[in-house]
Amino acid sequence: MKKWQIYPSAALADAVTKDAEEKGISISAALVEALEKAYGITGENEEMSMTDVLSKIQLEVEEFIADQLANPEFAILEFTLYKASETFAEISMGDPNGRLVAMKPRLGKAFRKLVDDKTIKHVIPARKPNGEQKREHNAAVYRIVKED
C-alpha cells in the first residue's frame, strides 16, 4: 500500500471531512473508498465498501450485545470484534485480497470511534487496572455495560 500526500481545496477538504464524519470512518478511509468507487476498483467483494463492511459489523455487534444483555446470567461481559462479528472474524490477514487485509485495522479504529462517540450503545473500552486499553492478541477488548 502506498502513502500519498495531497493538497485538497477547502471545498474538497470540507466535503471529505463531512463524509468521513457521517460514515464514522477516517478521512483516509473516506478518500480511499471514494477513489476505489471512482476507478471501479473494489476487489473480490465488489459491493462492499469500507462503510458497508463497518455497517455490517456494527449490526452484528449490536445483535451480540442485545443477546448478552437478554441473558445476564450467561453473558460474556468482555469481547473483541473477532468474537462479536462474524464478518470481522472472516477477514483473514493472510487473504490474497490486499484490499480487505488493509481494511481490517481501519475497521477496528472506526469501530473504536463508534464506541467513543456512543454510537454503539452499552459498550465501553475494557481497561487494565493501570488504565490502559485491554488487548487480546493485539485486538482491542470491549466491555458490555447495562447503561451507557
Image (cartoon, rainbow, N blue to C red):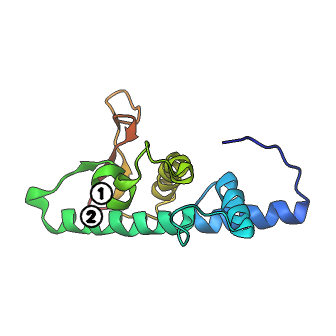
- The amino acid sitting under disc 2 is Phe
- Taking the image as drawn, is residue 111 in sight? yes
Q: Residues within 10 Å of mark 2 (few under 14, many from 20)?
A: some
Which of disc 2 and disc 1 is earlier in sequence?
2
Residue 139 percent across, percent down from the top left: 38, 40
The single residue placed furthest to the bottom in the displayed view is: 47
Q: Which mark is residue 84?
A: 1
- The amino acid sitting under disc 1 is Ala
For numbered disc 1, what is the local secondary structure? Answer: helix
Q: CB under 8 Å between callouts 1 and 2?
A: yes
Residue pointed to by mark 2: 64
Residue 25 percent across, percent down from the top left: 60, 58
**Residue at horizontal 9 percent and vertical 57 percent from the top:** 74
**Residue at horizontal 54 percent and vertical 52 percent from the top:** 103
* In-front residue for pair 86/2: 2
* In-front residue for pair 114/98: 98
Q: Residues within 10 Å of mark 1 (few under 14, many from 20)?
A: many
Q: Is residue 79 above or below residue 85?
A: above
**Residue at horizontal 57 percent and vertical 66 percent from the top:** 49
In the rendered structure, the answer to whether residue 105 lies left or right of residue 58 reads: right
Q: Is residue 135 above or below residue 86?
A: above
The single residue placed furthest to the left in the displayed view is: 73
The single residue placed furthest to the top in the displayed view is: 130
Report how far apart the C-alphas of labels 1 and 2 lie in the structure.
6 Å
